[in-house]
Image (spheres, grey):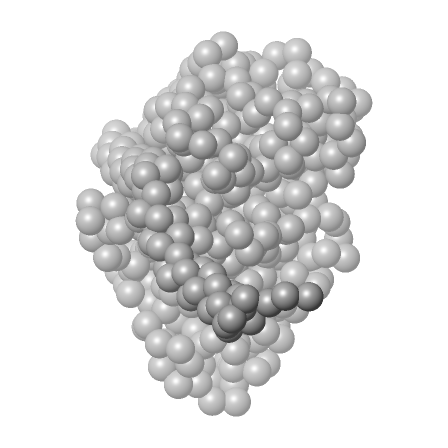
Amino acid sequence: MYHPPGGYRNAGAGRWRTARFARMELPLRLTKGILSSTRWRTRIVVWTAAGLAGLAAAGFAALSSVALREFSVLVEGRLWLTLLLTPLVGMLVVGLTQRHFPGAAGSGIPQVIAATRVLKHGGSVTALISLRIALGKVGLGALALLGGFSAGREGPTVQICASIMHYAHRLLPNPRALRAPDLALAGGAAGIAAAFNTPLAGITFAIEELGRRFESRASGVLLSTIIVAGLMAIALDGNYRYFGELTVGANGAGIIPAVLVASVVCGLAGGAFSRLLLWPQRAVDSRLWAWRRRRPVLFAGLCGLLVALIGCAAGGASFGSGYSITSQAIGGQIVLPWYTAIARFAATAATYFSGIPGGIFAPSLAVGAAIGFDLSQWFNFGVAAHPLVAICMAGFLAAATQSPITATIIVMEMVDGHAMVISLMATALIAKAISERMGPELYQQLAVDFARAADPGSNHR
């Protein structure tokens, strides 16, 4: 066979030139991907939505603060007024919720969990997260606080931010660039981060409670959403600590029996609280809950009356989210009566049963703080009151939600110092272990009904 002179060399040179050009084109392809207009438009949409979510969280926080302050001014020296105000506000809020904002009732966290499940099956979630629901959650949630209900804004903020981020999905230049469940999950996590000013808690909450099957490709969306929403909230509210400055120092061996006692007390109390809130789901055919379904507005009025009676009996200690009274107790301005934890526990349960838009995070932390103050008075562990308050806040929240890592990090980011990390984690884990023997996870179990109602054709568990 005839070969031209230099044939093999030329063929080798051709292969060398091909490989060389391939190496030169690689950075060009990367550069083209980095500078892709579609990618940048996607980022702009996501970051803009995250900023709006942070703005909504800060606005809701400001509106809630105004409502709580106005309630305090209105009933100061005349707690009897709540016997009229709280039932009427409850009936008004539930009536507006039922008529104009269905889906806005309750905490909001189970709705977001259900929405992520339904979205994975391609179902519609307009009954769970939407801009209409977000608007109702802000206005009606603040109105409920104006009536003195024992509710928090943190769970509602999760639903508000998830609604905004989910709406942003339809504005993406390429909807396949990001999955709708990932955006909703990122919005919910940003809601926790912005509401508590605790970014790490937002990340762990997304993994531990919202996502469960968290995928690595969603991590960038999650982190950037939390950062942008958190920065927006901090820019408007400042870099504050949720319940004020809870300073704890080094603790000796006395913290060990304190952790054990607090874990058992908070585990039993939190487990009972979670089981109580699941009562309507477990006894769905009972006369009480069947009557509530037929007359939701009247039922809300009766729950409001119960909240008012509890508050009057407790000297006002159980009204509102618990933020103000707990902050004052932590700051040493007031001393909590021994019955504060019981009153807050009962008022929060009655508030939840009423069907108003309101969460249980802040009231749960307030119950835990009250338990901590009680234990510091009843037992001589050789430690100050503040460490007991911190570990009981983490313990009760972990038992109520069965999310020990989130509870630990939320409280840890409120505490000035890292000496409590092991104690907080131990208390949260033990309390959660006790609580899970008493019933299923609160948010996950509540999400089952929401998912089934929104997507009847799928088997949601």
x, y percent for residue 134: 41, 27
> Where's the N terminus, which quadrant?
bottom right
Q: Vertically, is 94 above or below 64?
A: above
Q: Vertically, is 333 above or below 209?
A: below
x, y percent for residue 47: 32, 42
**How many marks on residues?**
0
320 vs 281, left or right, is left
Residue placed most toward the observer, 164 or 8: 8
Q: Which residue is pictured at 35% across the width and 55% down the height?
A: 28
Outermost bottom residue: 253
Q: Quadrant of residue 460?
A: top right
Q: Examine the rendering and report whether any part of residue 209 can be seen.
A: yes
x, y percent for residue 82: 38, 27
Outermost front residue: 2
Residue placed most toward the observer, 252 or 86: 252
Residue placed most toward the observer, 19 or 297: 19
x, y percent for residue 141: 40, 29
> Where's the C terminus, which quadrant?
top right
Q: Vertically, is 446 above or below 101?
A: below
Residue placed most toward the observer, 27 or 353: 27
Q: Examine the rendering and report whether any part of residue 19 can be seen.
A: no
Q: Which residue is pictured at 44% across the width and 41% down the height?
A: 187
Q: Which residue is pictured at 26% across the width and 51% down the height?
A: 231
Q: Which residue is pictured at 64% across the width and 25% down the height?
A: 123
